[in-house]
Amino acid sequence: MRKSLMTAAVLLGVALLAAFASDGQALISLEKCTLCHGKPEFRKLLVNGAIRDVFVTGDSLKGSVHEKKVCTDCHFDVSEIPHRERPKRVTCTHCHFKGNKEGAPQSDNVLAYFESAHGKAIAAGNVKAPLCQDCHGDHQILKVKNAGSKVSRGKVAETCGRCHMEIYARFKTSIHGVALEKGIPEAPSCTGCHGEHRIYAHTDPKSTVYPTKVSEQCSKCHASVAIMSKYGIEAEQVATYKESFHGVANQFGSRTVANCSSCHGVHDIRPPEDPLSMVNARNIPATCGKASCHPGATANFAVGKIHVDPKKKEAGIIYWTATFFKYLTIGTMLALIVHIFLDMYGRTRRLRGEQGR
Amino acid sequence: MSKADLAQGKVIRMSLLFRVQHLLLTVLLLVLALTGFALMYHENALAQAIIRFEGGVQNRGVVHRIAAVLLMANMAYHIFYMLLSREGRAEFRDFLVSRKDIDEFLQSLRYNVGMTSEYPRFGRYGFKEKFQYWGTSVGILLIAFTGFMLWAETFSMRVFPKFVLDLALIIHGYQGLLGFLLLFLWHVYNVHFAPSVFPMNPSWITGKVSAEWLRREHPLEYEKLKGEGLL
């Protein structure tokens, strides 16, 4: 009985201490942390021999979006200095949720992330899947508009490429990767097509690159005359695709029919003049001739424009045939209607004549 | 012609076999038009409803092809029947186009605008029937040819360059539209709305027309039957 009372008292004491400690969190000042962490030689040797750099100064947050925060705002599990255990990974959701009062942006991106391929992987226990800080960085988190940000247009591919290495290598030499490198403002990076926090596997119907959604995604730029005319690219490719057998089947939900990337490639899209391009005339037999598409395709597949619009003069004989049929149909219809009225008129006269007889 | 028919003043104009061919042609052309135009005008809400009704774009293609194969079979049967049977050969001779048809067409035009008082006297088939018959035949052959090309698209593209298939698609669609409009305006007028037959020329169901109608519309045929003692 005495023993259990003692235990209860100890427990109560611990709880009270913990409460005081959490109240005191904000009181732990930067100076206290930099006492140790501010020494450049302050490093931790890990069991596997690697060195973890834990050097932090008062300038570490300077210029970042968290400039006004102190260490324990994020590392809130540090309640005593020096801390005995390694602090846990920072949980950004502490502040970053809709309705927060900390001044963090009011956004549902965190929730969206948990639904995404990355969030699901984390939940499934994949330790390699990225958390917020894997993409956004740790102490030097900058606004996405800031060119120095790890998730800025210019840098995000590199950030994704830290895990998706092969894809990054392919993307870098693709037309989009090259354009991005040149600083062309409209060139898409990874997030341009895949989304940011809402990234799903391409086999997930929610994905922006799901087979039936690809053309829509590409059309965001490629159907825009304002963007395409700047670089001398035709903007009607999307419209002509949608009119083609492929496009119609795709719009009615076929997942096996060709979409933009079936022919042009995915991360390795190159201009048709490039000998490595999937739609280079020399590669078209192989591209069209995939086993599930048109096996046995020949060079004939490349003879004639692929994205052809019969309503445009550039389509040549196709345009002229379509125009011929158009006027033939209109002409025939007019002639027939006139003839039908004449016939009725004639019949009436004949009928009158017979009655008069 | 049975005595009962003659007593009622009826003349057989379409035998049972032709009526069956005609009915098949009607149904199959309607199915082909419905499935074909749904694809051609796929952006239209009605077309999309039709495609959904047909079980999606994949099934639409299947229905279209089945109807096409049946139509080809019907057509092949018709050709054999026209060339090999006694009845067919007689019909075929009646359908041959000659100089006379052009003259009659021009004469009917002159009559209709009041330049002459004589309306041409047609035989069993006048220029209207011949135009309809040969127009439909040539149209169907053209559509069938391009249709098979598009059906076997991988094979066709191995033989022809890609633009030939684009052309085939254009011809297939526009020829279909032209043919369908012709059938609607011309044939439906001639057999339904023309004052002499309104509301319908019953021969496609009963096979018979009245002798009086024949006398007015196809006087030469009427006189021929009379001469043979069949009337």
Image (tube, coloured by chain):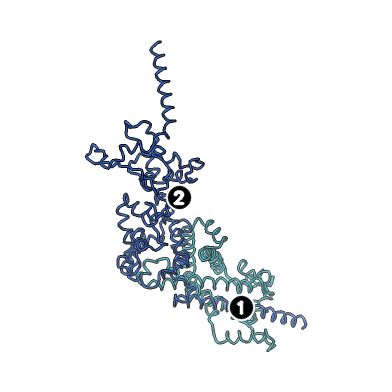
Chain colours: A blue, B cyan
Tell me the tag on residue A206.
2
- Identified by mark 1, the residue type is Leu
Q: Secondary structure at mark 2?
A: loop
Image coordinates of residue A123 in percent, x first then y, are: 39, 39
Q: Nearer the viewer, residue A109 or B42?
A: A109
> As displayed, is residue A50 above or below residue A315?
above
- Identified by mark 2, the residue type is Lys
Image coordinates of residue A354 in percent, x first then y, are: 74, 81
Corner quadrant of residue A154: bottom left
Query: Which residue carries the number 1 mark?
Result: A334
Q: Is residue A307 left or right of residue B186?
A: left
Farthest residue to the bottom: give it.
B115
What residue do we see at 67% from left, 75% from top?
B213
Farthest residue to the right: give it.
A356
Q: Chain of mark 1?
A: A
Q: Is residue A141 left or right of residue B198?
A: left
> As displayed, is residue A95 above or below residue B230?
above
Image coordinates of residue B170 in percent, x first then y, are: 47, 72
